[in-house]
Image (tube, grey):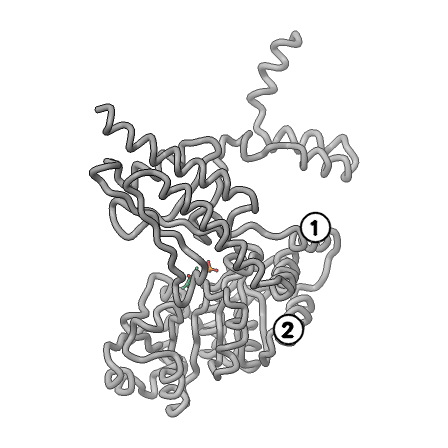
Amino acid sequence: MNRRDLLKNMSVIPVFGAFAGSANILPLTDAATTAVAKDYFKELGIRTFINAAGTYTAMTGSLMRPEVMNAINYASKDFVLLDELQDKVGERIAQLLKCEYATVTSGCASAMTLGAAGVLTGMDEKKVAQLPHLEGTGMKTEVIIQRKHDIAYAHALKNTGLKIVYTDTKEDLVNAISDKTALMYFLNANNFDGPVQVEEFLKIAQAHNIPTMIDCAADVPPVENLWKYTNMGYDLVCFSGGKGIRGPQSAGLLLGRKKYIQAARLSAPPRGNTIGRGLKVNKEEILGMLIALETYLATDHDKEWKMWEAQIKLIGDAATSVGGVTTTVKVPAIANHVPTLHVAWDAKKIPATAAELKEKLRSGSPSIEVADGENQHAIAITTWMLVPGQEKIVAAALKKALTEKALTETHG
Ligand SMILES: *Cc1c(COP(=O)(O)O)cnc(C)c1O
């Protein structure tokens, strides 16, 4: 085989195969250095992009800070016992967040499944093995949810075998409580949508001795939400790790009552005969979650907020410099509570749909993702997932895209 053939063949060797090959002959540290230099996404033909949309699971959540990656790399070099790590990290998180107990889960959805399992089984290992079959086991069978709080993620509760009882009014809610009720679930993001709000919901549950769970997946900032709802009295509080906290995307937090979280752990790895066996968090991500939380708590949140506002202003000014474009800045009350730029345009001056504009931004270099707007001639932008400096690229690209779409019409 001559050199040219060799090179030709090398180009078709799968990326990771090639890497594994070199790892065989290099000492570990050298292999690691080589790995850093490689552009894996590019070699795989995967598009990377500037995320001006937000913390979307499909867009891989958030970027972990260097502190988190240091912790992950650190953890990768030693064995520990999974339970001991969870015990100690859980204690530390509970201290930091001033709650009774805590554990790291494989996301908010996993916190919901495991938390509900803990409420159902208590410390009874026979019941743990019986899940998700509840009928005839002596376990309760229903979770109450206000219909306005019924989003796709409620499926995480059904994984335990629980049946959802939907309620439409306060009266409904009270009447739905029975000796079958295991849990009452509240979706914090929809607090103002349902007839019963967060404190009253809790009071109703407590008056009937029903355990409560609140889904706060995307509810930092503000940082104080990390202890607000355990303080309020919710038994179980669930957060995503890979949204505003910028921990591993496949990590989350289950916070609250020790008796339920200890019981939840019985359904979690390393234990095998459980509904939670597939909800494993590795040691790297457990430690990474803790360090993400510490780093988040130590962040200057006011300063960060001002930076987001300045970035939003820069992008907004660039957009409105194009004729026919208007912008407004809104901050959602709960969940994704960050300055959000709504960019709308007059379709007569800029005859492009939101989908067309998004595609233009997506196909640019660098590629940029933005969020859906309020109608077919609008998009939304947040800056909290930008690497500082990228706001200038987004501003210029948005202005260019809007201008080009406007010009298309002018020139026929
Ligand atoms: C994102 C989200 C979840 C799921 O969180 P993961 O951490 O991805 O498991 C659950 N509930 C709500 C309201 C969310 O926004």
Q: Is residue 4 left or right of residue 195?
A: right
Quarter of the image that includes the N terminus: top right
**Which residue does the numbered mark 1 point to in the structure image?**
73
Observer-side mark, 1 or 2, equals 2
The kind of residue on which mark 1 rests is Asn
Nearest the viewer among 50 and 251 is 50
User: Helix, strand or loop at disc 1?
Assistant: helix
Please state the horizontal and vertical placement of residue 357, each as a whole percent of the image.
33, 38
Q: What number of labels is visible? A: 2
Evaluate if marks 1 and 2 touch, with contact meaning CB atoms under 8 Å apart.
no
Residue at 67%, 33% (x, y): give it. Answer: 37
Would you identify the image quadrant in which residue 140 lies? bottom left
The kind of residue on which mark 2 rests is Leu
- The reply to whether residue 243 is in sight is yes
Question: Is the residue 15 above or below the residue 279 in the image?
Answer: above
Would you identify the image quadrant in which residue 353 lies? top left
Please state the horizontal and vertical placement of residue 129, each as a whole percent of the image.
49, 71
**Which residue does the numbered mark 2 point to in the structure image?**
96
The answer as to whether callout 1 falls within 8 Å of ligand 1 is no
Nearest the viewer among 24 and 249 is 249
Question: Is the residue 335 above or below the residue 91 in the image?
Answer: above
- The reply to whether residue 372 is in sight is no
User: Helix, strand or loop at disc 2?
Assistant: helix
Would you identify the image quadrant in which residue 354 lies? top left
Question: Is the residue 404 above or below the residue 143 in the image?
Answer: above
Please state the horizontal and vertical placement of residue 273, each as a whole percent of the image.
52, 66
Specify the farthest residue to the top: 2
Nearest the viewer among 164 and 357 is 357
* Mark 1–mark 2 distance (CA, rounded to whole Å): 23 Å
Residue at 59%, 52% (x, y): give it. Answer: 64
Q: Residues within 10 Å of mark 2 (few under 14, many from 20)?
A: some
Per the rendering, the mark at residue 58 is none
